[in-house]
Amino acid sequence: MDIYKKSIAELSDLLNKKIISSLEMTNYFIKRINSFDRELNSFITVDEENAQKQAINADLLIAEKNNTLLTGIPIAHKDLFSTKDILTTCASKMLENYIPPFDATVVNKLDKLGMVKLGKTNMDEFAMGSSNESSYFGPVKNPWDLSKVPGGSSGGSASAVAARLAPIATGSDTGGSIRQPAAFCGLTGLKPTYGSVSRYGMIAYASSLDQGGPIGRSAEDCRILFDEIKGYDKNDPTSNHKVIQKKSNLKISKDDAKNITIGIPKEYFLKDLDKDISDSIFESIKTFEKIGFNFKDISLSNQNLAIPAYYIIASAEASSNLSRYDGIKFGHRCSEPKNLEDLYLRTRKEGFGTEVKKRIMIGAYALSSGYYDEYYMRALKIRRIIRDNFASALNQVDYIFAPTTPTVAFNIGEKTSDATEMYLSDIYTTPVNLSGLPAASIPIGFSNKLPIGMQIIGNYFSEHNILNIADLFQKETDWHLRIPENFNHE
Ligand code: GLN
């Protein structure tokens, strides 16, 4: 039946018609994880027993006709979403044994619908990274080429969905961590408007930038998941009342396309961008033009300031958020501390990896009284400028197309010794987080057998339209249906 190839709607149809039960479907994906994940390392925890229990429950809901489209469908969660009674590590030694007493809102909402949690996916430690090499549990491999990184920090989620070990997964995007791994793995990923999806129970990295969202095989699958996880949450004061609570209908039809103008920012197509990526974007634009969309060259200046500003702001917030891991409240504690200072020092020295320590130091420095104005305040001013640049661009055009990454997936180990090179892989994604805008990355082609992604950026709370535009493209093309050869069998 090739279950692994199916969309959420197709899987749901099989469940409704009783062609397969949720328990059988769950066991099927667990079997795929067991046979393929040794190579990929995309999961930190697979909770077979819990998944089976949830599946049996889902089968009851289906039998009672008490089900929705997502009931009984398996999902993988990035290991920074707190899951009650299930290990949640954030890929850090600090939380190696942490079992949360509560669920993140996103997890809770999907549990209530009867989705089945297969397990928790590998990631960069505390979501800091662009390659999934900073995980305490070892690097994740890209299913398209095992010598390449899957992107980060949601690399485990992307690798798992690309190899079809799970039909869909959650991720989080602080500076690109949904879109960049989606691009490297040939998937569709949505970074929602800041405030659209509750951050309650998501382990914090940089609170003014973090946002959870779906990584799936198509825009349609991402829309189905996003519809269920979005919405105001009283437990997250930054979640937004404006998020449309009702289910989305397809808002943009082919006929609407002629009234829509998409901007191509010239600053995103300069020398940093790989030629194959730029060629693929212009090739895909031809398809969008055939559908009826209009295109316009625009300018988005100051984008080159995004990386320095992002790394100051994200590190500053991280240094504050991560101060809670002190060996007292929860998480790792060093053995036999001599005194309080020794407890703090050794706990943090042992518990955090190198990248996390670096960010904490950069952040603490940028926030220190002598340097606050020079670094942190300046970064905030740049953030404002970038936001204003987007606002004026989105006054001239309805959406913006941009590359997701400057290159396709790179070699494992290639950038670990050069932090600047690694940070520059987020050059096209961080401006969107600094502005709080929504953006999706969709697969549009290949370079040397590795997937290429393109971003569709829209105005605040336009994620449904963004996904609709992506869906119109995916109806005309089959990039999103390609599956890496070694994983394209039962
Ligand atoms: N690579 C970026 C960083 O390390 C983005 C990470 C993310 O979006 N979580 O900060």
Image (cartoon, helix red, strand yellow):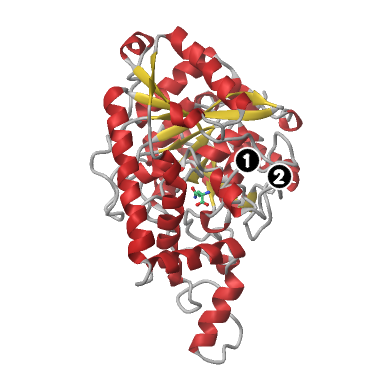
Residue 479 in picture, x, y percent from top left: 60, 21
Under mark 2, the amino acid is Leu
Disc 2 target residue:
40
297 w.r.t. 40: above or below: above
- Residue at left 32%, top 22%? 397
473 w.r.t. 336: above or below: above
Q: For the C terminus, give its image quadrant.
A: top right
Horizontal side of residue 41 vs 330, given as left or right: right
**Residues tagged 2 and 1 counted as in contact (Cβ below 8 A):** yes
Q: Nearer the viewer, residue 107 or 348?
A: 348
Residue 110 in view: no
Q: How many marks?
A: 2
Label 2 element class: helix
Q: Nearer the viewer, residue 484 or 248?
A: 484
Label 1 element class: helix
Residue 432 in view: yes
